[in-house]
Image (spheres, grey):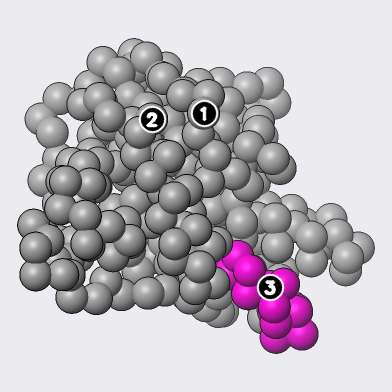
Amino acid sequence: MSHLPAAAAPNATRVAPPLEAPRRYPAQKPSDVYLFGTCVLDLFFPEAGMDAIRLLEREGIKVHFPQGQSCCGQPAYTSGYTAEAREVARAQLALFGGDWPLVVPSGSCAGMFRHHYYELFKDEPETLRQVEALAERTYELAEFLLEVCRIELQDSGAPVKVALHTSCSARREMNTHLHGRTLLAQLGQVERVDHDHESECCGFGGAFSVRMPDISGAMVRDKTAALKGSGAAEVVSADCGCLLNINGAFEKQRDELRGEHLASFLLRRTGGKEGGK
């Protein structure tokens, strides 16, 4: 569920984000970054957030985590509560005012920063300049590791078949599926298997799963059936909302298959955690 940026007010300095412009990456990785933990990761997958930090620190980067951060504003925004989303977003803008890149271990939240804040602040030219500056230095975690750190992974785990799930908005807005595939391809003992319904929504969609539980339930049943049918022994995703929904469905179905955040999977496979199998 996505809102495309509408035309900005006449006094706005920028009417829309550069959705189709090729992204230019810095020649060198930075010494410092901000991490935006996302509300779902903070509440349900805190270890994945710590693993993201460990991956970045392993690259020689100091990670800064402003304690006042909360939500990017996406749930309110996609539910039509624009004024409320704007105030949540304004609070986040105040926390990341430096020049460091903002790394987000969630493609959908990174997309909110990079694309939809333009719409929220289209009538505030001064704030819009802040939005533009933040958008230019916002990266989804897999993108940052691949394109900015230019990470080279050495697999230390046993052979395994893995299915990659990417949130639908992250695919559209951040190309997270391409970054995830490329990182997994660096792992010599990991075979990524394709699955039906790969590009389809898992049914979470933030508030959508609450407002439309029957439709959401049917969608996640299709998704879990496709994942199980792929023959994968593990499921990996870079979006915690999807993981929450998919893992909940697996648990309800009494299936042992579970999804793991990409950060945790990469760290585990490359010797950063015990038992990299």
* Residue at (27% x, 29% y) in the render: 97
Q: CA distance from mark 2 to mark 3?
A: 30 Å
- Give, as a three-letter code, the residue at label 3: Ser
Give the SS element for disc 2: loop
- Give, as a three-letter code, the residue at label 2: Leu
Left or right: 212 with respect to 266?
Answer: right
For disc 3, the marked residue is: 209
- Tell me if residue 155 can be seen: no
Give the SS element for disc 1: loop
Mark 1 is surrounded, within 10 Å at the Cα level, by few (under 14), some (14 to 19) or many (20 or more) other residues, namely few
Which of the two discs, 1 and 2, labels the residue nearer the N terminus? Answer: 1
Name the mark on residue 95. Answer: 2
Residue 190 counted in the magenta span: no
Give the SS element for disc 3: helix
Which of the two discs, 2 and 3, labels the residue nearer the N terminus? Answer: 2
For disc 1, the marked residue is: 68
- Expressed as whole percent of the image width and height from the top left, the position of residue 69 reads 50, 34
Q: Return the residue nearer the eye: 10 or 14.
A: 10
* Residue at (35% x, 33% y) in the render: 94
Asked if the residue under mark 2 is in contact with the one under mark 1, i.e. CB atoms within 8 Å, the reply is: yes
- Expressed as whole percent of the image width and height from the top left, the position of residue 247 reads 75, 57
- Give, as a three-letter code, the residue at label 1: Gly
* Residue at (15% x, 25% y) in the render: 28
Compared with residue 87, is residue 245 higher up or lower down, i.e. above or below? below
Q: Which residues are magenta?
A: 204-218
Left or right: 23 with respect to 93?
Answer: left
Compared with residue 183, is residue 272 higher up or lower down, i.e. above or below? above
Compared with residue 2, is residue 12 higher up or lower down, i.e. above or below? above
Residue 213 counted in the magenta span: yes
